[in-house]
Amino acid sequence: MKKLFLLGVAAALAMLASCNPSKAPLKMEVRHFADTSAYARINMDVELPLAANKTSAAIRATLLDVMDHALSHVSNSGEERDFNRYDGDINDSDALFSYYEKKALEAITVASDRDCGERVLDIYASETLSDSEKDYYAKNISGWDHEYTLRKLEESDSYVVFDSQSYVSYGGAHGGIIGEGPVTFSKKDGHPVLGFFEPDSKEPMQKLLREGMQRYFQSRIDEVGLELDAFLSLPEDGLIPLPAWNPYPVADSLHFVYQQYEVAPYASGMPEFSLPLNKVRGYLIDDARKVIGR
């Protein structure tokens, strides 16, 4: 009897979710692609919502713009695109993904062939290397990497968060993380939250930001016995900036992620921490408060 009751509750909840699409989890599709060329490697792991209703269709369209910008700039050419935006049916997943997989691979192949080819010529033009050394360095030249990830981070009845970022390496000493970062969407109408904090929030939030940074660096502080500021690279005003990437909600907290070099040296990684929503709510813009819904 208890089993039948639970099945009845599950059916009722499913019916309520169908009547109120915003409370139902987004239906997702997942795509993986990886390939290599002579001097490059590209990898894509993408999660996109299916356009099951107006809200999910709006979120999908915005995420396509985000994905397009990441993959159409694989040659590190700044604002100059490597190829045109996909102009077909964005709900035709096979055509959509095939286009970006093919074009991104072509673009990174052309750029890496040119760059690495020039470096190989420089190696053989060297007057200080032996012939065997030239052959070794030319054969083992560092190529290019582009690993793109678009994934769902969080979802509630009122919002859904996607994270867009790339690991890129252009044959240097180490690669780096770039991209849009976390994007929070309203599940009511699918619009993205474009900002979280009211202007001039940085200074009054210093105590909270320092507490978060303290938690991130605490193990290193304990290890070497230095104060927090010894691990930070701050601007002239000495204030911890709000992160370039928007924070995103996680249950009753707001999660902050700083990019490499943003507030600390590369070796410190990407500092991150969560702050309770009840402590930061007063600094949020109206749209962020409404979408988070807490």
Image: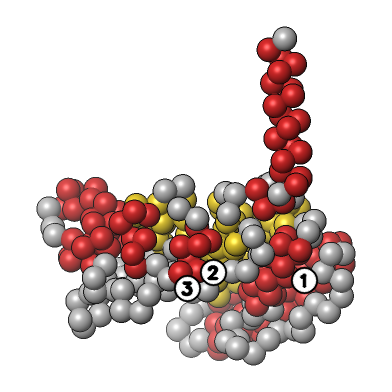
Residue for badge 1: 100
Within 10 Å of the Cα at label 2, are there few (<14), some (14-19), or many (20+) other Cα atoms? many
Looking at marks 1 and 3 on the same chain, the residue that comes earlier in the sequence is marked by: 1
The residue sitting at 65% across, 48% down in the picture is 23
Looking at marks 2 and 1 on the same chain, the residue that comes earlier in the sequence is marked by: 1
Q: 176 or 192, which lies in front?
A: 192
Please give left or right for residue 233 compared with residue 272 in the image.
Answer: left
Secondary structure beneath dot 3 equals: loop
Query: What amino acid is at disc 3?
Result: Gly
Q: Are marks 2 and 1 in contact (CB under 8 Å)?
A: no
Query: What amino acid is at disc 2?
Result: Val
Secondary structure beneath dot 1 equals: helix
Within 10 Å of the Cα at label 1, are there few (<14), some (14-19), or many (20+) other Cα atoms? many
Residue for badge 3: 195
Q: Are marks 3 and 2 in contact (CB under 8 Å)?
A: yes
Horizontal and vertical percent for residue 158? 58, 54
Query: What amino acid is at disc 1?
Result: Tyr
The residue sitting at 30% across, 56% down in the picture is 279
Whole-angstrom CA distance, mark 1 to mark 3, is 29 Å
Residue for badge 2: 193
As drawn, 83 above or below 54: below
